[in-house]
Amino acid sequence: MDLSRAIAAADNGMWSSVIDCLQDFPLDRLKDNDRVLDLALQVLLHGDLEQQWTIAKIIPKLGEIALQPLIELVNNPDIDLEDRWAAGRILGGFNQPQSIAALVTLIQQDEDPELTAIATGALAQIGTPAIAALTALLVPTAAGGSSQLALAVGTLARIRHSQTIEPLLQLVDNPDPQIRTLVIEALGSFHDPRVLPLLISKLTDVSASVRKATVVALCLRGDLATELNLLDRLQPLLFDLNLEVCLAAARGLARVNDPGVVPLLAKVLGSSQTPDRLKSAVILALGWIGTQPAIDVLIAALTQTDPFAPELMIAIGKTERERTYASQQLVAYWRSSHLAATPLPSIVKQEIATALGNLGNLATVPDLEQLLTDPDDRVRLHAHTAIAKLSSTI
């Protein structure tokens, strides 16, 4: 097979036809083929986005002859940024010192945010061979500023290899809170004995973003709740001056295997001083925990926190661990509401029906049938849907 058809197609700007020809070309004849490389680069420079994506899969098959032309494209300020981005993405498929050096240079130049993002993504794709070059960027004089340093740290984080731990540890006390946050986010994914003491020390960092990242990282180690005394360490963060930290603590505690978590969250939920967003996060956390004590807290809150009743119902309906128990308690609440002086709002009855349908307990069908007589069309619709869902499980 020769390239005459592909060359003719290129002369007429028929880039899809060029791609078809190159895709049919034998793999052993692609490698180190200068004529194929020329055609592929034409498609890269003149084709549309879809054609660029397709040719990007072919170019690496040509071997190292493609490296220098791609590097020249990436560094050429006179061509469209889209074409430079495409060349940068392809460089990520080359595990070669030249490609790594070119991509690092892009980060140092910080010329265009999207172009820099392509470079960092490509380096992350290269992986461990790029760690040494990225580590060199962590030196302040080499990084050229906090933005490049942040990019280098972020790229190391994406590689997720134990070789990145040591260079990242050198930056845990960097004066820039953004850098400290990125470092904590990166290190939090490693089960390394050096990381846990560091995380614990950062719970009191002056930066809210660092405290939040630390809470998230520590809660991923909920299996070590007793060993690390996580509940006591995280409890103050539920009352942090920064609401985002409080939200992270509420969500994270759902992962902590400690019986004291539910009473603590119940206290926060029941407090009149708790912001609404935090109450919503606590409700979700209790639903995720899904134990009988957690469900009891959610049911009890239904009689105390009317504005949050729909959210409470949703959380109960999504619990996984004690679905039968949850449905029984929800039905008990529904029946007791008949005796109340004020009827339940329609939105609450809708969520009761939906929750019972999700929990899968066929014994609750008679109660759902009562909702079929509700004067509100939406309540009847939700009840009918729940019954149909339960019936489909028979």
Image (tube, helix red, strand yellow):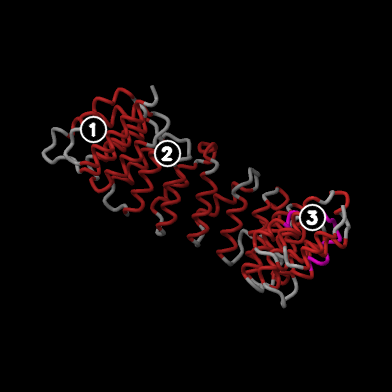
> Magenta segment, principal secondary structure?
helix
Q: Mark 3 points at which residue?
A: 22
Q: Which kind of residue does numbered mark 1 sit on? A: Tyr
Quadrant (top left, top right, bottom left, bottom right) of the C terminus: top left
Name the residue at 27% across, 43% down. 309
Give the spatial CA distance, label 2 vs label 1. Answer: 20 Å
Pick whichever of labels 2 and 1 is earlier in the sequence: 2
Q: Which kind of residue does numbered mark 2 sit on? A: Trp
Q: Mark 2 points at which residue?
A: 288
Name the residue at 28% across, 32% down. 330
- Using the image, tell me which numbered label, if any, was put on residue 188: none
- Magenta segment, which residues? 55-71
Q: Does the magenta stretch include residue 260?
A: no
User: In the drawing, does residue 248 fall left or right of residue 306?
Assistant: right
Question: Pointer 3: residues within 10 angstroms few (<14), some, or many (20+)?
Answer: many
Q: Which kind of residue does numbered mark 3 sit on? A: Leu
Viewer-proximal residue, 126 or 167? 126
Q: Is residue 274 above or below residue 376?
A: below
